[in-house]
Image: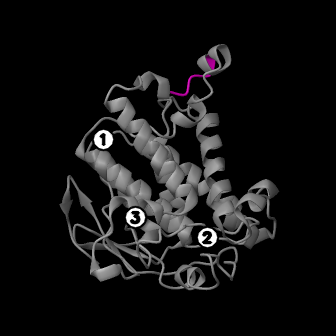
Amino acid sequence: MVYAQAGDNNSGEWEGNRSPTPSEMFHELPFVTKVWFGATVIVTLSANFGIIDVYQTFFLWDKITGNLEVWRFLACFCYAGRFSMGLLFLLYTHVSFSQRYEGGIPFNTGAGGGTADYAFCWLLGAVGCLLTYSVLGLPPMFHTNMVYYVLYVWSKKHPTNKASIWGFPVQGIYLPFVYLALTVVMGQDYRSMLHGLTLGHLYYFFADALPLTSGKNLLQTPQFLVQYFGYNTYTATPTPAFGGRNQWGGAHDTTAGATARSSGSGGGTTAASPRGGNSGGSGYNWGSGGTRLGTN
């Protein structure tokens, strides 16, 4: 399977031009991305080192209802697979595109394009996975599905951002399909990826396409999420040991998202992104198997 390796898009300055530590980079992540990525690392490492049984991360309804193993509701989205180079790139793709979408003003479904809207987006994707996987005969583990769900939604929000795949430039709008095509050509299992991309398209249709064409806003971010995260609020909290923002990679926003993040205080944004609004950005690098394959 092919994974994205994002370039260094650091938009801040670190003290003494030093490189950020992993702890600093992690604390710079937006809230939802930080929780999901942190949980994924913990669950994946625990399963690979034998601390927990991989079987405990599967979504098995009979175990949930019969033995009250409710952790399966979340663990199935946080196990990324066995140790391999592919796992590293999958995790990198996970954190890159989740960070870029959450931090670049998500589709506005009622919270002004803030963290609450991304949390609602993520929950809808998770529910979609749980309701449809058995019909399609997919395995009861959904980390890969959710990564490509988020990637697809990001590509629709930032269609003009460019990537470089083995030296060939690709616009963000085509990125999910290039992923899928390369996976099929390489003879690898594409079902979970296709599942995630399909769910991502459904979310995009109801969050952006339908409101633009019919004026109907069927998706509304629940009020409890708005109250918890705030309206149009970006929640990354920088640690006091350094300045600026770290960028984990991915095609970053240089227009609306960056402008909003630089406005106000406490990391809050001040201008909501209208439904259907897209922001451009610069490119990133792609790689597979640990090799950097070029920059855009």
Magenta: main secondary structure: loop
What span is colored magenta in the figure? Answer: 58-62
* Residue 36 visible: yes
Q: Quadrant of residue 81?
A: top left
Q: Secondary structure at mark 1?
A: loop
Query: Identity of the amino acid at label 2?
Result: Tyr
Q: Quadrant of residue 87?
A: top left
Query: Identity of the amino acid at label 3?
Result: Glu
Task: Give the Cα separation between the discs numbered 1 and 2.
Answer: 37 Å
Residue under the point 47% across and 72% down: 240
Name the side, left or right, on which 137 lies relative to 49.
right
Which mark's residue is nearer the viewer, 2 or 3?
A: 3
In the image, 291 versus 191, the foreground residue is 291
Circle 2 sits on which residue? Answer: 234
Residue under the point 68% across and 82% down: 270
Circle 1 sits on which residue? Answer: 188
Query: Identity of the amino acid at label 1?
Result: Gln
- Dot 1 crowding, Cα within 10 Å, few <14, some 14–19, many 20+: few
Tell whether label 2 touches label 1 (CB within 8 Å): no
